């Protein structure tokens, strides 16, 4: 029986996740189209992308919930396909929709998961009690989950993922739909988890969240990694700062955009409702050129500023997508979250 | 938050298989979950409570006079028949509920846990034996109230009851398979009915076989349900064990041997 017990070579434990060329198709639709990921042990890795970019599919493949169509993935050196049962002993998964039992109470949920993970009857009860206390759910422990709020459900879901204290946690959009206060609490919890030695791979559509939490970020769009690096590296890749202009007369917007793009020789982003133009600026001096050109064109400005780039701009520049209504409101929401948590 | 640090992956003892003992423990835990669910939503026991009562009353008084001359002498024929028919119909619900259950997020977690793959299915099926037990006991009690006094004695009646429960559990694997491959709960119900009706009615459960046309007798005689009904009659009415008991148990084992693996495989493949 010795051969079934495997220990990792120490050299392998540097990487928690190594994925090469992951592909998954659903019919004709390639949800994930050749994704590479390297996640260092003990770090928080953010996978950032709009809805439908392939984030969830990627996580589900790494967590043995979906078969790979092609490519390979290793978790702490273990192959996801061949050693799936070993992988399941090393990971915790928290889904986009809370994966807990609706018809049971919080305590019953945790006890059943503990029992399944091999804890004894008394141990399971104790563990459930500890986790409920840790996540502030003790008062609601006996209530059926039907009456739980979204935040409570998420907390219970995360608690369930921590029973076995897995060294790698997959969190699929852990804060989507949470209010600012709960979101800030979730961020704290994730940071503390990493301090205890866990590795976290999280997906998010909130740029702010990736910026706040992740040591490294992969930007995914249309099933491909379009950029990878630290938050600072990604920001640096789109220029050192950005120029923001607001025109007085919305009718001038198009003229202003053309002028800006001509002078800076770069693509800009236009928000029609706000009458705003945002453009990356390699050199702050060039702002003067833009202003002169706009005066010559007879465009009157209401506001003008030069700012350090946000991840929003990085994201838009990289993916080349116009920002959708949804993404605009969600990213501004996450900024509110920041303010609230300060 | 706990201060103890998390044991690194490299220092853990890991195994890439599940032992038989673990499979059993996991399945029992999942069965416990099933029982908790029944406790939380007792209304799902309506069918197993009402069906035996209504069917036993209905069939006995409708067919009793026509088939056996009077109700009392029909009881030894109909009670084992009704019992098998009711309990096996009950096992159909297993597939429907499994389908509903699998659509919930919690099955994602079961899949991501290092547990035996068969456990979520086996556990659900195991928990459902409580439903079969309720239906079995109620049918016998109804029969007793109406004047059925099985000559085999209580011991043999208990063995007969156990036989019906075991066979229904085996047959529920067929419905579990439909439950796993079907898209919606209502389609599970549809397919299952299609299988169930010919099987239970084209048998010796309600009427003597020799009243049927020859071609039909041929089917009724090879129908495993007929053998199960005969085995129950032998046990309850005469206290004897015949070849039909053997055929029933072998049939049950064959069903599990075929349907358990393909159900688990379909369950694993489904995403």
Image (cartoon, coloured by chain):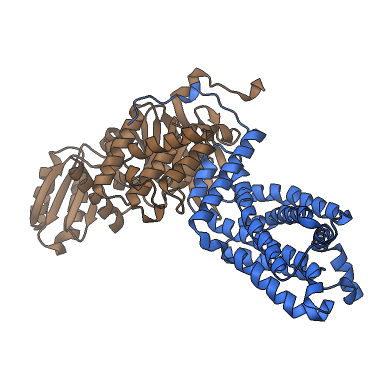
Q: Nearer the viewer, residue A125 or B199?
A: A125
Q: Nearer the viewer, residue B237 or B88?
A: B237
Q: Position of residue A119 (x, y in %)?
A: 51, 33
Name the side, left or right, on which A114 lies relative to B28: left
Q: Position of residue A236 (x, y in %)?
A: 26, 35
Q: Nearer the viewer, residue A152 or A28?
A: A152
Q: Position of residue B171 (x, y in %)?
A: 72, 56
Q: Residue at x 73, y 67 (%)?
A: B82
**Taking B34 as reference, is B13 above or below it?**
above
**Taking B234 as reference, is A243 above or below it?**
above
- Output the letter for the chain in blue: B
Q: Residue at x 30, y 46 (%)?
A: A206
Report the number of discs.
0
Quarter location, residue A202 = top left
Query: Is residue A162 visible in this depiction of the protein?
Result: no
Quarter location, residue B217 = bottom right
Q: Position of residue A295 (x, y in %)?
A: 8, 53
Q: Colour of chain A?
A: brown
Q: Residue at x 46, y 45 (%)?
A: A108
Query: Is residue B28 visible in this depiction of the protein?
Result: yes
Quarter location, residue B202 = bottom right
**Taking A293 as reference, is A128 above or below it?**
above
Q: Residue furthest top?
A: A10
The N terminus of chain B, quarter of image: top left
Name the side, left or right, on which B6 lies relative to A335: right
């Amino acid at each position: 029986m010795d051969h079934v017990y495997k220990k990792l070579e120490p050299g392998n434990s540097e990487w928690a996740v190594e994925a090469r060329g992951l592909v998954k198709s659903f019919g004709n639709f390639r949800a994930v189209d050749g994704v590479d990921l390297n996640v260092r042990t003990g770090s928080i890795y953010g996978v950032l992308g709009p809805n439908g970019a392939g984030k969830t599919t990627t996580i589900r493949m790494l967590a043995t919930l979906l078969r790979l169509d092609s490519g390979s993935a290793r978790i702490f050196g273990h192959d996801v396909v061949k050693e799936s049962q070993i992988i399941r002993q090393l990971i915790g998964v928290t889904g986009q929709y809370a994966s807990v039992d609706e018809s049971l109470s919080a305590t019953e949920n945790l006890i059943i998961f503990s029992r399944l993970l091999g804890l004894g009857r008394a141990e399971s009860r104790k563990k459930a009690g500890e986790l409920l206390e840790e996540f502030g759910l003790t008062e609601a422990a006996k209530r059926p989950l039907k009456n739980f709020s979204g935040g409570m459900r998420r907390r219970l879901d995360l608690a369930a993922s921590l029973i076995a204290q897995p060294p790698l946690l997959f969190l699929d959009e852990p804060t989507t739909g949470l209010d600012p206060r709960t979101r800030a609490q979730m961020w704290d919890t994730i940071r503390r988890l990493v301090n205890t030695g866990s590795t976290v791979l999280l997906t998010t559509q909130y740029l702010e969240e990736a910026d706040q939490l992740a040591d490294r970020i992969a930007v995914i769009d249309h099933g491909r990694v379009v950029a990878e690096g630290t938050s600072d590296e990604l920001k640096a890749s789109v220029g050192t700062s950005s120029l923001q202009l607001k025109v007085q007369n919305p009718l001038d917007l198009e003229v202003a955009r053309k002028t800006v793009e001509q002078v800076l020789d770069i693509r800009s982003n236009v928000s029609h409702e706000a009458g705003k133009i945002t453009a990356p600026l390699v050199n702050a001096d060039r702002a003067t050129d833009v202003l002169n050109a706009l005066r010559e064109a007879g465009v009157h400005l209401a506001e003008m500023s030069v700012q350090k780039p946000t991840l929003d701009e990085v994201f838009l520049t990289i993916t080349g997508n116009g920002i959708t209504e949804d993404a605009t409101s969600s990213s501004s929401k996450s900024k509110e979250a920041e303010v609230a948590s300060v | 938050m706990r201060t103890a640090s998390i044991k690194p992956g490299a220092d853990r003892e890991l195994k890439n298989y599940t032992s038989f003992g673990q499979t059993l423990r996991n399945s029992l835990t999942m069965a416990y979950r099933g029982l908790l669910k029944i406790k939380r939503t007792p209304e799902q026991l309506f069918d197993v409570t009402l069906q035996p009562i209504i069917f036993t009353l209905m069939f006995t008084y409708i067919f009793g006079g026509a088939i056996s001359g009077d109700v009392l002498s029909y009881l030894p024929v109909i009670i084992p028949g009704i019992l098998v028919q009711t309990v096996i119909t009950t096992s159909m619900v297993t597939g429907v509920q499994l389908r509903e259950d699998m659509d919930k997020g919690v099955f994602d977690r079961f899949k991501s846990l290092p547990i035996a793959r068969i456990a979520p299915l086996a556990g659900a099926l195991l928990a459902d034996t409580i439903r079969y037990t309720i239906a079995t006991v109620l049918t016998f009690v109804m029969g007793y109230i109406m004047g059925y006094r099985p000559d085999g004695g209580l011991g043999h009646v208990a063995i007969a009851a156990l036989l019906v429960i075991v066979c229904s559990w085996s047959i529920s694997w067929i419905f579990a398979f439909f439950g796993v491959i079907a898209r919606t709960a209502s389609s599970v119900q549809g397919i299952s009915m299609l299988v169930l009706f010919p099987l239970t009615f084209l048998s010796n459960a309600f009427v003597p076989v020799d009243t049927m046309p020859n071609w039909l007798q041929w089917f009724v005689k090879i129908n495993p349900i007929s053998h199960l009904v005969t085995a129950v009659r032998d046990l309850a009415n005469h206290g004897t064990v015949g070849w039909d008991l053997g055929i029933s148990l072998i049939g049950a084992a064959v069903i599990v041997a075929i349907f358990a693996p393909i159900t688990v495989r379909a369950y694993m493949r489904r995403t």
